[in-house]
Amino acid sequence: MNKRYEMDNRVIVRADDVGKVYQEGAMQTPVLQHVSFELRRGETLAIVGASGSGKSTLLHILGGLDTLSHGEVEVDGRKLSSLSDAARGKVRNHSMGFIYQFHHLLPEFTALENVAMPLLIRGESIPAAREEATALLQRVGLGHRLEHRSAELSGGERQRCAIARALVTRPAVVLGDEPTGNLDESNAAQVYQLMLELNREIGTALILVTHDRRLARRMDRTLELVSGVLQPVAAEADVAG
Ligand SMILES: Nc1ncnc2c1ncn2[C@@H]1O[C@H](COP(=O)(O)OP(=O)(O)OP(=O)(O)O)[C@@H](O)[C@H]1O
């Protein structure tokens, strides 16, 4: 990829006093409390925390996939709670990329088709989408696998393809939920490295939920969810992997 983006210092994600309570009949489960942070263009943030501390819930709220009970989330200048479903979908397609633990590639489509899809959804022409997708797949080392269906790719290749799909729209922010959680150590390190390199090249902000504190240390910042409260990680010793 040869496009380099002017870096500005704009706030891309702002969480302001976010709270989440799951309500099932009379039962209330408070999950997030007073979560506030800002992420600027190109910054990388790891969110760590024990199982059940609310990491995925927070990521879903930031990604506009779940509603909040209190506070506000702003992504790329848009307040998510004030948007219609259609407008929120547009922000998701234009400003966000998603990488999950399991790749969620469409199995009946080729790598090239999977990566081109977000561009086609936003209305780009087929030749332009194919060209962009091809360039990014080459960048993630899959230039020789363009016509393979995802079932015909290895685990590491699928995650690299998922990274290409998340970044092909050059989103303002990528949200990753344990994107390396399903890979062996060497593939995980390679995928992490690639995400950080592309993040720098494109100027995308990156929020990763991870259990892997060793990998988290390579991000600009790490915040920890402790029983739904987001706080700085106490000491360097605590993030030793
Ligand atoms: N739909 C729901 N209704 C009620 N409680 C829920 C719901 N979804 C999640 N929870 C609860 O919210 C808490 C936080 O869940 P979440 O999945 O965000 O945790 P997590 O930190 O991502 O955990 P893990 O690391 O195990 O994936 C958990 O205690 C969970 O039981």
Image (cartoon, rainbow, N blue to C red):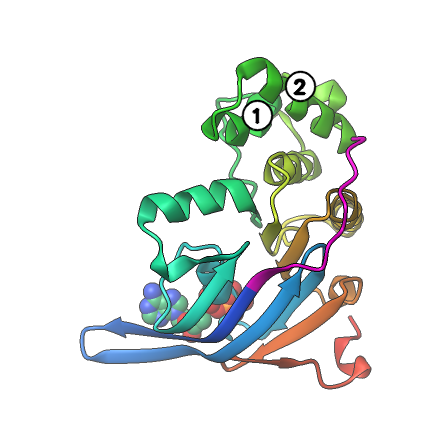
Label 1 residue SS: helix
Quarter location, residue 25: bottom left
Q: Could you tell me which quadrant the N terminus lies in?
A: top right
Residue 120 at what x, y percent from top left?
50, 25
The amino acid marked with disc number 2 is: Glu
- Specify the label residue 116 is tagged with: 1
Q: Does residue 123 appear anywhere in the picture? A: yes
Kindly indicate the quadrant of the structure image that contains residue 28: bottom left
Viewer-closest of 171 and 10: 10
Residue 226 in the image: state x and y as whole percent.
56, 82
Asked if residue 4 lies in the magenta stretch, the reply is yes
Quadrant of ligand 1: it is bottom left
Looking at the rendered image, the quarter that the C terminus falls into is: bottom right
Residue positioned 55% across, 66% down in the render: 14
Is there any visible trace of residue 210 in the rendered image? no
Is residue 208 shown above or below 221?
Answer: above
The relative height of residue 153 versus residue 65 in the rendered view (above or below) is: above
Q: Which residues are magenta?
A: 1-13
Considering the numbered disc 2 on the image, is that residue within a helix, a strand or a loop?
Answer: helix
Q: Which residue is mark 2?
A: 131
Residue furthest to the top: 127
In the image: residue 217, left or right of residue 64: right
Q: Is mark 1 within 8 Å of ligand 1?
A: no
- Rendered residue at 26%/73% (across/down): 23
- Mark 2 vs mark 1, CA separation in Å: 9 Å
The relative height of residue 78 versus residue 232 in the rendered view (above or below) is above
In percent of width and height, residue 239 lies at 76, 76
Mark 1 belongs to which amino acid? Ala
